[in-house]
Image (cartoon, rainbow, N blue to C red):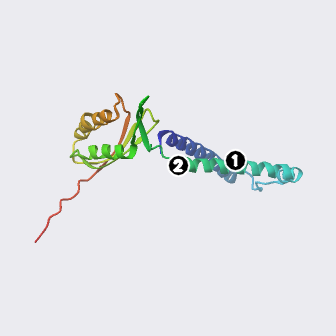
Amino acid sequence: MNRKTGRGNRWGLALVGLVLAVLGGLALARGLLGPSTPIVDAGVRGFFARNSPPVWWAVAAVSVLVALLALRWLVAQGRRDARTRLRLEAGPDGVTEIAAGGMAHAVAADVAASPAVLNADADLVGPRGQPEVRLRVAADEAAPMSELSEHLSRVTLPNLRDALDRDHVPAVARVSLEPSPATQRVVR
């Protein structure tokens, strides 16, 4: 999930939560402080009886709209921005492209070479001419973070920029700290 999708999720969930909290508060206030009459009184029943077909068509249209918005949201959750191929150069002599998966695997292996890293994974995303790298790193919680930061800034990212022949490649690294694996002893 990319940042734009995450931001949309947060705003949508906040809006739905706010509406539900207000409606719940109003229902609670009416139940505690209001009269003990039914919520749907004769006026509401009369309105639906007088405007029967158009009201139900409007309810159906709103329901379809909500269903389409929900379907769009589900599709956006599954979308990945990962690239399959990267174009490095295009000219009169031809086009130079590389497999993004192979480059991402090389970047992940480069990150995993650091002693502070337990596991690493990478994706190359973004438009064809301006790739970005997204790293997921599981680092040893006992290792100093400066070691990982230095390895990324002095080894991994310069190697990636050289491989892509770019002066600037945006990168986002999500680092999770995990306990170092226990050393295994063999008893004979």
Left or right, 1 with respect to 147, comes to right
In the rendered image, residue 67, in percent from the top left (x then y), is placed at: 66, 51
Q: Nearer the viewer, residue 153 or 86?
A: 86
Question: What x and y, as percent, mark residue 115?
Answer: 21, 46
Can you tell which quarter of the image residue 45 is in?
A: bottom right
Does the image show residue 140?
no
Report whether residue 53 is seen. Answer: yes
Tag 2: residue type? Gln
In terms of secondary structure, where does tag 2 sit? helix
Q: Earlier in the sequence, mark 1 or mark 2?
A: 1
Figure quadrant of residue 184: bottom left
Give the total of numbered labels: 2
Residue at screen point 56% across, 46% down: 13
Residue placed furthest toward the front: 93
Residue drawn at (78%, 48%) of the image: 58
Circle number at residue 88: none
Q: To which residue does mark 2 refer? A: 77
**Left or right of residue 8, residue 57 in this image:** right
Front position in the image: 141 or 74:
74
Is residue 179 shown left or right of residue 67? left
Separation (CA) of disc 1 from disc 2: 19 Å
Q: What secondary structure is marked by label 1?
A: helix
Q: State the residue lying farthest toward the right.
A: 50
Residue type, mark 1 in image: Leu
In x, y percent, where is residue 123? 39, 44
Q: Residue 171: x and y, percent?
A: 37, 36
- Local packing at callout 1 (Cα closer than 10 Å; few below 14, some 14-19, many 20+) is few
Label 1 belongs to which residue? Answer: 65
Side of 129 relative to 186 (left or right): right
What residue is at 31 percent from the left and 45 percent from the top? 106
Discs 1, 2 touching: Cβ within 8 Å = no
Quadrant in which the C terminus is drawn: bottom left
